[in-house]
Image (cartoon, rainbow, N blue to C red):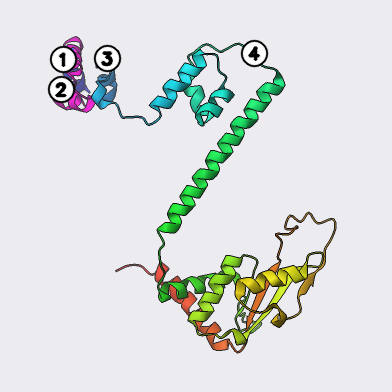
Amino acid sequence: MAHAQHKYADFEGLRERAVALRRAGLSRRQIRDRLHIDNNDILNRLLDGEPAPDWTKRPNAKDDLRDRARELRLQGWTYDRIQVELGCSKSSISLWVRDLPRPERKRSGEEAAAIARRGWEATLRSREEERRRTKAAAGETVGDLSDREVFLAGVVLYWAEGAKDKSYSRRERLQFINSDPNVIRLFLRWLDLLEVERERLTLRVSIHESANVEAAEKFWADVTGVDATSFSRATLKKHHPRTARKNTGEAYRGCLMIYVRQSAELYRRMEGAWYGIVGGVTRRPD
């Protein structure tokens, strides 16, 4: 402690040197290293009031937006109107213009509400576009899958969604149900890889009795490439009026159940591969 106090005893002299270096264009790190200052509080006091040189300032992609937002605010624009004009968030606008005078209210409550609604709609569109870009970019990173990758993906999918064998109830057969057409397509691609012919499949739609069963069967026939007339009789679920179901309307197609006949060996291979995956991800590397 005594050494540190002695080191900074000539504070004013040290400050003069620090300020001179700052005005010469040095960064904080350069000044710290040049003067052997290892205390950030001391460095802050030495450079108090001295602006950073331009070259140390990071470029900000929102500088133009901020300047435009301040310009519009000085013209009397509200946050909502600026948001609609620039497509940025109100929180950012607030940070950029909070030191500027607040404009007088010149609109009715209905007009202000309409502007706010348009601003929110613009924000939602921006968020949706960001979601779309993120998903598209992630999808492009996958590329083509090898047969091994398809096999492993199918094993994981089945273990998550398919029927499993239990020690108290032996069910060594492949039985799968899902409402997502893409999931069904992946499962069928997996079965193709396992050389399971379509003739070995029993397909059945499970759907609420109030839905259009015929349309649902046609939909799943198109997804699977299997004639709807070969489907087993649909399983109808009772509809309770007091149940707040959201999966109604024309887009509701129920679930498709897929049974693979004579599939005990395939089931065992699937389960064995699943535990192989588990072992692979939990095994400690050498």
Front residue (pair 162, 142): 142
Residue at 52% from the left image edge and 11% from the top image edge:
101
The disc at residue 50 is 3
Dot placed on the residue nearer the N-terminal end, 2 or 1: 1
Secondary element under disc 2, as helix, strand or loop, is helix
Distance from the alpha carbon under mark 4 to that under mark 3: 42 Å
Say whether residue 74 is magenta: no
Can you identify the residue that label 4 sits on? 106
Total marks shown come to 4
Q: Are marks 2 and 1 in contact (CB under 8 Å)?
A: yes
Q: Earlier in the sequence, mark 4 or mark 1?
A: 1
Asked if disc 2 and disc 4 are in contact, CB closer than 8 Å, the reply is no
Q: Is residue 159 visible?
A: no
Q: Which residue is mark 1?
A: 17
Closer to the N terminus: mark 1 or mark 3?
Answer: 1
Query: Mark 2 to mark 4: distance in Å?
Result: 57 Å
Amino acid type, residue under disc 2 in the picture:
Leu
Q: Which of label 4 and label 1 is nearer to you?
A: 4
Question: Does the residue at mark 4 contact the one at mark 1 (Cβ under 8 Å)?
Answer: no
Identified by mark 4, the residue type is: Lys
- The segment highlighted magenta reads 11-38
